[in-house]
Image: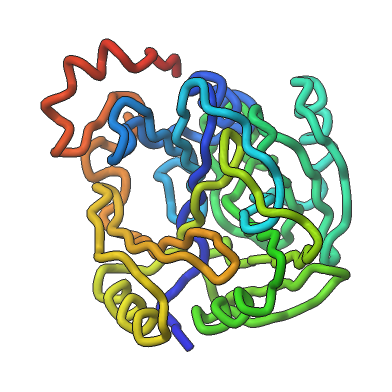
């Protein structure tokens, strides 16, 4: 069993409109846009990062907004819901705030003893706010949401699968352990993690596969402290039979990727070097930052990419 994984690092999804996406996370959810860069593989498309003040691993939601992308279709083989942690007794505030903004899919439920407010993102993304007692992580305090009510980071994700046991075994190998079952749901949790340390697996054997598009999660990333820990994880995964990519420099972290038995793309990302690598803390997410291999495209990209308001 691996011990290097510390919880979620980030979750990356697909969107249709960059400005709508930025406004949703910064103006409505009160998160900070901590980086404005481009997709490494498609530099004509933004890669936008949102999180707490510094973009701490375990708080970061990222998006590739592809103009004119088709909407995703829900199903199995995907991350169906991304959950954020909020303080206890704050869901009334959030329900009123989201309802006032005409956010769809509002539903309050209880799952594994936790109060959970479900809602949809602009592209039908599945989200939830979960009241988590004792979460000491600091929210972004300079946004429109008061700090005592704000998002602390991820609580976890829910994966929908035709069959959950193989993915549960993989997560167990990665250091998670099963702590509860509720209906079709299996809750896997990481001890002594970074706060973003819960993965729920939902087995739906009669549901067809999801189709990726706007509103779909592209991949879910798990955090390790540094490249040494990442190398240890990579070696162990390969020895266990996983097909793992070489290490890839993503500027703000180093990444490896592999596909799970249920079809979901996993990433292992380092906590280093972080988002202050090319911007100071006070100005994160304002300027367009380009990977070195795309720096020569700056004049073209500054004209073709839509200008984003803060």
State the quadrant of the C terminus: top left
The image quadrant that residue 133 belongs to is: bottom right
In this image, 245 relative to 91: left or right? left
Query: Front-most of 240 and 173?
Result: 240
Q: Would you say residue 84 is visible in this rendering?
A: no
Q: Position of residue 21 (x, y in %)?
A: 54, 26
User: What's the residue at 62%, 54% (across, down)?
Assistant: 79
Q: Position of residue 259 (x, y in %)?
A: 47, 65
Query: Front-most of 299 and 23?
Result: 299
In this image, 218 relative to 77: left or right? left
On screen, residue 49 above or below 207: above
The image quadrant that residue 280 belongs to is: top left
Q: Position of residue 57 (x, y in %)?
A: 44, 55
User: What's the residue at 28%, 25% (across, down)?
Assistant: 288
On screen, residue 10 above or below 17: below
User: What's the residue at 25%, 63% (across, down)?
Assistant: 247
User: What's the residue at 72%, 72% (across, down)?
Assistant: 187
Query: Front-most of 88 and 14?
Result: 14
On screen, residue 238 above or below 284: below
The image quadrant that residue 38 belongs to is: top left
Say how many tags the image has.
0
Q: Would you say residue 232 is visible in this rendering?
A: yes
Query: Front-most of 76 and 57?
Result: 76
The color scheme shown is rainbow
Q: Position of residue 25 (x, y in %)?
A: 57, 31
Q: Residue furthest left?
A: 296
In this image, 42 relative to 160: left or right? left
């Amino acid at each position: 069993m691996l011990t290097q994984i510390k919880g979620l690092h980030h979750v990356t999804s697909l969107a249709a409109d960059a400005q709508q996406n930025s406004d949703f996370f910064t103006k409505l959810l009160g998160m900070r846009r901590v980086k404005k860069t481009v997709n490494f593989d498609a530099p004509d498309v933004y890669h936008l990062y949102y999180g707490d003040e510094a973009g701490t691993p375990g708080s970061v939601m990222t998006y590739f907004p592809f103009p004119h992308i088709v909407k995703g279709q829900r199903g199995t083989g995907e991350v169906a819901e991304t959950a954020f942690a909020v303080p206890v007794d704050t869901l009334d505030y959030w329900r009123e705030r989201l309802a006032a903004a005409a956010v769809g899919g509002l539903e309050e439920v209880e799952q594994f003893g936790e109060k959970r407010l479900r809602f949809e993102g602009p592209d039908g993304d599945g989200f939830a706010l979960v009241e988590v007692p004792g979460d000491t992580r600091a929210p972004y305090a300079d946004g429109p949401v008061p700090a005592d009510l704000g998002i602390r980071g991820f609580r976890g994700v829910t994966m929908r699968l035709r069959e959950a046991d193989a993915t549960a075994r993989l997560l167990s190998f990665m250091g998670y352990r099963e702590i509860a079952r509720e209906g079709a749901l299996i809750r896997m949790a990481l001890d002594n993690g970074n706060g973003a340390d819960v993965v729920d697996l939902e087995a739906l054997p009669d549901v067809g596969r999801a189709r990726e598009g706007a509103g779909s999660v592209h991949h879910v990333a798990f955090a390790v402290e540094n490249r040494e820990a990442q190398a240890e994880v990579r070696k162990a995964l390969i020895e266990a039979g996983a097909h793992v990519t070489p290490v890839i420099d993503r500027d703000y972290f180093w990444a490896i990727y592999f596909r799970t038995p249920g079809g979901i793309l996993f990433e292992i990302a380092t906590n280093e070097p972080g988002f202050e690598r090319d911007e100071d803390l006070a100005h994160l997410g304002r300027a367009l930052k380009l990977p070195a291999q795309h720096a020569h495209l700056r004049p073209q990209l500054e004209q073709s990419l839509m200008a984003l308001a803060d």
